[in-house]
Amino acid sequence: MENMLSDIIVSNRKHTANGQVATYIPELKKANGDDLGICIIDKYNNIYCAGDYDKKFTIQSISKTIVLAMALMDNEWDYVFSKVGMEPSGDPFNSIMKLETNDTKIPCNPMINAGAIVTTSLIKGKNLKDKEERMLSFFRKLAKNDSLQINNSVYESEKLTGDRNRAMAYLLKNDGIIEGDVNETLELYFKQCSIEVSVVDLARIGLLFANYGIDIETGERVISENISRMIKTFMVTCGMYDASGEFALKVGIPAKSGVGGGIMASVPNRMGIGVFGPSLDKKGNSIAGLKVLEDLAQRLSLSIF
Ligand code: GLN
């Protein structure tokens, strides 16, 4: 298995040259565009890694899956889905357009920025500090890694350049979709995006969703079966933004990307996969990471379809 993964990394590294690291968050420019790594954890807890698997990067939009799980655990589901929709948007991740043109004015789904800002606003806690602590400890529990931390430089950088997210949040507040303090919601959103992970963490979290919310090592139920199913479904329909349809055809597994270069994939009943390649395509997905998953899905017949 590890030889096969090394082969896949070696043969796909060339694709990193066709993309670019994210620049709109200045701190992300520091990433090395040539990096490419993978980790798989299967349901027997075998861990296989190859390439730049030991690099750290910020989780960015992959956090949207975890925060959605929290929002669904903290609130009635009908309430959550009265504020965020269930349909792919077909637009880029940071698009603001449909917030005005949709009849309901709610974001299309929780995997785009506007939708994720809403789910973040639904996290319960006494104050910002309390919400931040709850969030970080939930991420740590899912990744089974107590050392997960917020990368402060990335957080500051997001905050400095996050005006588009601010614009969306204020619009959502104006329309009564976000209740409470908008700035607090934005702070928490910038923080969740800035949590630092490795591909091993992503594979571990992907495995938990693949295993319907049960920790394979301890047998503990961490997330309900229904919530795990909902997260994986959103990953299929919206996880790669306006490239989700092509990804479903070519790869066919639930996956979620982030502009830090990570992709978390979850193969039901089989494995969790973490991929890292910070060189991105025009839609904000890891350009070589997509190729790696395409190869892997073909070699191991992973498509759920
Ligand atoms: N923090 C990023 C943003 O809000 C997350 C986007 C992403 O990973 N696609 O723009």
Image (cartoon, rainbow, N blue to C red):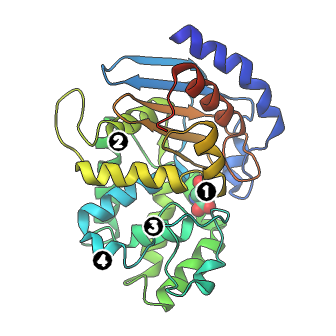
Check the image and report above or below for 79 versus 218: below
Q: How far apart are marks 3 and 4 (CA)?
A: 13 Å
**CB under 8 Å between callouts 3 and 4?**
no
User: Which x, y percent locates residue 111?
Assistant: 51, 60
**What residue is shown with label 1?**
241
Task: Please tell me how crowded label 2 is: few (under 14), some (14-19), or many (20+) other residues with Cα within 10 Å.
Answer: many
Chain-order first, disc 4 or disc 1: 4
Residue 86, numbered circle? 3
Q: Which callout, 3 or 4, points at the residue further toward the start of the chain?
A: 4
Residue for badge 2: 209
Number of callouts in the render? 4
Q: Is mark 3 on a helix, strand or loop?
A: loop
- Determine the residue positioned at 65% across, 13% down: 7
Mark closer to the chain start, 4 or 2: 4
Would you identify the image quadrant in which residue 202 lies? top left
Residue 67 visible in the picture? yes
Query: Which of the 4 image quarters holds residue 57?
Result: top right
Q: Which of marks 3 and 1 is nearer the N terminus?
A: 3
Position in image of residue 230 (x %, y %): 36, 55
**100 relative to 284, above or below:** below
Going by the numbered disc 4, the residue's amino acid type is Tyr
Residue 194 in view in this figure: no
Mark 3 or 4: in front is 3
Mark 4 surroundings: few (<14), some (14-19) or many (≥20) residues within 10 A: few
Residue at 40% x, 68% y is 119
Residue labelled with disc 4: 79
Q: What element carries label 2?
A: helix
Kindly tell me whether mark 2's CB lies below 8 Å from ligand 1.
Answer: no
Nearer-N-terminus badge (3/2): 3
Q: Does the residue labelled 1 lie within 8 Å of ligand 1?
A: yes
Give the CA separation, mark 4 to mark 1: 24 Å
For image coordinates 44% across by 73% down, the residue present is 84
